[in-house]
């Protein structure tokens, strides 16, 4: 068997097509990094080099790699039942997980529908909303309202309701038509304007769209508080409060995509809590299993559930399925993760880590090419700009973020900037000393990326 990075890379490049990647990059100065193992917040390659996982392996890992407690739970479940069809059958892990999720979710979310991953959960929520209106005699409702710069996944329905053109533009002929309104992203506010004031101003656009199109709209879908794939764009919770009220007035569903921001990322278990609202449908994945296994869930309430509950001959059932729906191993990992949250008081512990990240990252705001340092809980973002005063971005063709990525790897830190935005979204087991390293390496990378 190969024992070095180069040997594994050669085998990989012969057959593997990597996600979100121009594969030609890996034939030049951006070599693949094959990982042999992970422990805690660290990854190790086949040459023995270690990397601090500052992005939680694409935002999924909560309690570190090879967490002993989650390992044990998955191992124990593996000895009992690895999988069973969830149509006509059930099992203890999915029942217990559903009970526990509905107990901690925003009020009124009492039903759990499982799928395989985040994009699949979005597809479920879109179809469920559309089908609800059909079942209740509102067949004219068939459109969705989404926010500028939103991202909800890359299957066709999820891609349609997103608004990151890099992912969406080429597939536009395949996508359903949606209504898009300006984002409440506080980065766009005027110099003297508060984030809440800007959220209220931007909400007027959504209110106007609802007033005109509610009769044909199934739902508004958004990422609560942080638009992650757009560069960790953040907005005030007031927007969610105003939206919840407007959706009620106009009889439109509210779909909360908490796939990336759920499970403590924004400082509360679910981001919607910070606005004191409950969505009609809430999508969860990524941190649901603490990054161990692909699993997602759509939570909803009795009003939507009962619209599908009837005699078989009425053909009103929600006929959507995935082969691995409610997989017992994924459920076991999720239950172990919830145990850690409860018993180790994770949210309280994270407040200290978030404060330390804020303190260490704050000086970066003085950099001549940093337009903003922003934070929401355990997410920190640093926006690089060609012109700080006017917030003029660097041209995307210059790939400034890639320069940061390459420098960070050379220093043993995994950072994966989004365009001109360097961000931290580390596992919750990171230490203050590791945060210091993470921020210092990012500072060095930003300095190198913006020096010419």
Image (spheres, helix red, strand yellow):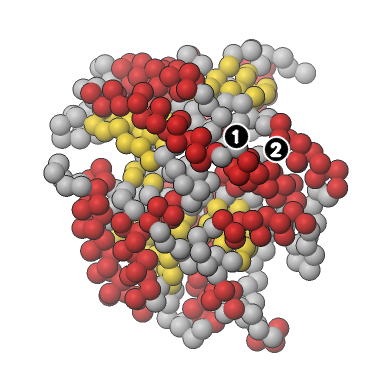
Residue 229 can be seen, yes or no: no
Q: Is residue 262 left or right of residue 143?
A: right
Sort mark 1 into few (<14), some (14-19) or many (20+) by Cα contacts within 10 Å: many
The residue nearer to you, when weighing 268 against 394, is: 268
168 is higher (above) or lower (below) than 41: below
Q: Are marks 1 and 2 in contact (CB under 8 Å)?
A: yes
Residue 218 quadrant: bottom left
365 is higher (above) or lower (below) than 258: above
- Disc with the residue nearer the chain's start (1 vs 2): 1
The residue nearer to you, when weighing 40 against 124, is: 40
Question: Which residue is painted at 44% across and 51% down in the image?
Answer: 271
Residue behind mark 1: 63
Q: Position of residue 362 (x, y in %)?
A: 30, 27
Residue 386 image label: none
Q: Position of residue 8 (x, y in %)?
A: 67, 21
Element on which disc 2 rests: helix
Residue 70 image label: 2
Q: Is residue 7 left or right of residue 28?
A: right
Question: Which residue is painted at 39% across and 17% down in the image?
Answer: 440
Question: Which residue is painted at 71% across and 56% down in the image?
Answer: 96
Element on which disc 1 rests: loop
> How many numbered callouts?
2
Question: Which residue is painted at 30% across and 32% down in the image?
Answer: 373
**Quadrant occupied by the N terminus:** top right
Sort mark 2 into few (<14), some (14-19) or many (20+) by Cα contacts within 10 Å: many
246 is higher (above) or lower (below) than 225: below
């Amino acid at each position: 068997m190969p024992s070095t990075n180069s040997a594994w890379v050669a085998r990989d490049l012969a057959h593997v097509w990597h996600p979100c990647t121009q594969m030609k990059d890996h034939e030049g100065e951006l070599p693949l990094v094959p990982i042999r193992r992970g422990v805690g917040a660290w990854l190790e390659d086949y040459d023995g080099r270690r990397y601090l996982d500052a992005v939680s392996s694409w935002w999924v890992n909560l309690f570190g790699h090879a967490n002993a407690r989650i390992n044990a739970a998955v191992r124990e479940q593996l000895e009992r039942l690895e999988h069973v069809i969830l149509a006509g059958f059930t099992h203890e892990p999915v029942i217990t997980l559903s009970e526990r999720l509905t107990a901690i979710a925003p009020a009124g979310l009492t039903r759990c529908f499982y799928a395989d991953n985040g994009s699949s959960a979005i597809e479920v929520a879109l179809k469920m909303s559309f089908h609800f209106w059909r079942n209740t005699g509102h067949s004219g409702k068939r459109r969705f309202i989404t926010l500028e710069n939103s991202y909800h996944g890359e299957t066709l329905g999820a891609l349609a309701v997103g608004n990151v053109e890099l992912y969406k533009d080429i597939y536009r002929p395949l996508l359903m038509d949606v209504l898009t309104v300006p984002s409440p992203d506080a980065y766009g506010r005027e110099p003297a304007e508060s984030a809440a004031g800007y959220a209220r101003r931007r909400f007027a656009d959504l209110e106007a769209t609802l007033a005109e199109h509610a009769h044909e709209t199934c739902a508004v879908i958004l990422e609560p508080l942080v638009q992650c794939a757009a560069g960790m764009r953040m907005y005030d919770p007031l927007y969610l409060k105003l939206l919840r009220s407007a959706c009620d007035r106009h009889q439109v569903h509210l779909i909360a995509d908490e796939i990336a921001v759920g499970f403590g990322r924004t400082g509360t278990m679910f981001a919607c809590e910070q606005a004191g609202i409950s969505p009609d449908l809430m999508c969860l994945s990524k941190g649901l299993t603490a990054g161990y296994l692909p699993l997602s869930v759509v939570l909803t309430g009795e009003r939507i559930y009962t619209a599908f509950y009837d005699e078989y001959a009425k053909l009103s059932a929600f006929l959507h399925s995935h082969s691995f729906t409610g997989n017992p191993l994924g459920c076991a990992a999720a239950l172990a993760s919830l145990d850690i949250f409860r018993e180790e008081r994770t949210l309280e512990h994270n407040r200290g880590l978030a404060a330390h990240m804020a303190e260490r990252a704050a000086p970066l705001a003085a950099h001549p090419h940093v337009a903003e340092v922003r934070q929401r809980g355990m997410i920190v973002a640093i926006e690089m700009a060609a012109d700080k005063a006017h917030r003029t971005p660097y041209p995307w063709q210059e790939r400034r973020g890639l320069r940061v990525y390459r420098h960070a790897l050379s220093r043993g830190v995994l950072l994966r900037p989004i365009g001109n935005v360097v961000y931290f979204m580390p596992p919750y087991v990171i230490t203050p000393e590791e945060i210091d390293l993470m921020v210092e390496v990012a500072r060095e990378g930003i300095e190198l990326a913006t020096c010419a």
